[in-house]
Image: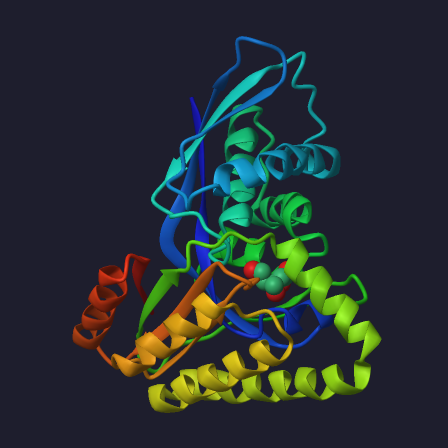
Amino acid sequence: MSTGSGFGKAILFGEHFVVYGKASIASGISKKTTVTLVEGKEPGFKIIDKRPAADGYIEKYAEAQRESVELMNKAVWHLDFDANPVEVTIGGDLYCASGVGASAASCVAMARAVSEHFNLNLNDEQINLCGLEGDKAYAGTPSGIDNTCSTYGGLIFFRKNLDGGSNQMDQITLGKPLNILLVSTGVTTKTKQAVDGVRERKEKDPEYYEPIFDQAEELVILAKDALAQGNLIKVGQLMDQNHTLLQEIRVSHPKLDHLVDLTRENGALGAKMTGGGMGGYMIALFADEETQELAARVCESEGFKVIRARIG
Ligand code: MEV
């Protein structure tokens, strides 16, 4: 039996804008998607998906998942699964809903297990490439931030190289650890839909969109310093501002806005949607574990799924 895993991720700053080469900050989280792979009994690449997930998530993405395997095989593995069948079981403790990098994590986990089973000896860079290729089935034109977090973990400043060269990826050393909550709206929306929507609107009305993209860039540069200095009040304020920008490009959702307000009212230093949006997850930052726990309970009392995480 071969195994593999990929980290879930949380984007702290810059989702959507990152697709256009703007700066972003994201982190791997300790929740993971794991894969076990055994020789298959029938020709092909059989997937048994046992991940904990929001209602409808697994079904909605089943086709994209099959496509992700084809894309990874075409780009990196070059294997004949009819001649060498495999059966892959996906699980782990990452609760899958849009926004926590579940698709990239499953690609990275599968790539690691395939590499082990077929002795491909893929290094992290090649695994990361698998994650990027596979994630195209879900996100269309992924920036690469999700697969990078999923492969390497840690907190990173990330900038996509729009000319196809290496992306900028700098580890950030935190001044203070971050107590965060990731709260799922329970609404599953395809990342591709959200990304395509931004592209269409931006192309139609560049005069409205360009300044928002520039503001997003400035905000991430300030956030990088605030994180390094441990200035959590400032980090929280910048998260709030980032949420406003995401509302302005119309990728938020009434449930995301509700969760942002709810966590702010219950002690968050700042809160925003995270990931593709239009549903999916919200992220909130807290000064300490006590306030984090209080807000987590409030969200849970309203029926929302919560991931408690600590970065750094
Ligand atoms: C999705 O987790 C993040 C987006 O910025 C898309 C991408 O970066 O590929 C919305």
Quarter occupied by residue 71:
top right
At horizontal 31% and vertical 63% (from top left) the residue drawn is: 309
Quarter occupied by residue 28:
bottom left
Q: Ligand 1 lies in which image quarter? A: bottom right
- Check the image and tell me how it is coloured: rainbow
Task: Report if residue 273 is visible in the image.
Answer: yes
Viewer-closest of 188 and 168: 188
At horizontal 81% and vertical 66% (from top left) the residue drawn is: 163
Viewer-closest of 271 and 265: 265
Question: How many numbered marks, from 0 up?
Answer: 0
Question: Is 290 on the left-hand or right-hand side of 3?
Answer: left
| Residue 157 placement (x, y as % from top left) | 54, 73
Figure quadrant of the C terminus: bottom left
- When the figure is inspected, residue 308 is found, relative to residue 87, above or below; the finding is below
At horizontal 28% and vertical 57% (from top left) the residue drawn is: 303
| Residue 128 placement (x, y as % from top left) | 60, 49
Question: Is 273 on the left-hand or right-hand side of 144?
Answer: left
Viewer-closest of 79 and 18: 18
- Give the residue furthest to the left: 290
- When the figure is inspected, residue 233 is found, relative to residue 285, above or below; the finding is below
| Residue 144 placement (x, y as % from top left) | 63, 58
Task: Report if residue 156 is visible in the image.
Answer: no
- When the figure is inspected, residue 124 is found, relative to residue 73, above or below; the finding is below
Figure quadrant of the N terminus: top left
At horizontal 70% and vertical 68% (from top left) the residue drawn is: 198
Question: Is 252 on the left-hand or right-hand side of 193?
Answer: left
